[in-house]
Image (cartoon, rainbow, N blue to C red):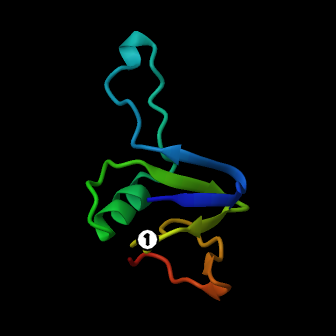
Amino acid sequence: MAIKVTEPGLLTTIQDLGRKGFQQYGVVVGGVMDDAAARLANIMVGNSEDEAVLELTVIGPSLMFEQDYLISICGADLSAKIDNTRVPLWRP
């Protein structure tokens, strides 16, 4: 299974829901910027809601999927495309 990154985009990162409950030890919570979008994207593709996701900003990446995957794009509308065709948000 592989996803090839052909263009990384601007600040594309892998994020999870963060490290809640450890602030007293000096650990920053961190994690996704849009908690609801990350949770819903995971649920829509059958993952546990706390799985890591790709988080994109302003200029998203170009990715090559080397096999079929079920994906969901949630959050801000960055005009996502698959094979040059716009992809609807908030659905698998």
Q: Quadrant of residue 62?
A: bottom right
Would residue 69 appear left or right of 59 to someone viewing this image? left
Q: Looking at the image, which is closer to me, 7 or 30?
A: 7
Q: Quadrant of residue 22?
A: top left
Q: Looking at the image, which is closer to me, 60 or 8?
A: 8
Q: How many marks?
A: 1
Percent across and percent down for residue 51 are: 34, 49
Q: Looking at the image, which is closer to me, 84 or 39?
A: 84
Disc 1 residue type? Ser
Percent across and percent down for residue 64 are: 60, 68
Percent across and percent down for residue 91 are: 40, 78
Instruction: Identify the residue under disc 1.
Output: 72
Rendered position, 65 above or below 28: below
Residue drawn where x is 46% and y is 53% of the image: 53
Residue drawn where x is 45% and y is 13% of the image: 26
What element does badge 1 sit on? loop
Rendered position, 70 above or below 50: below
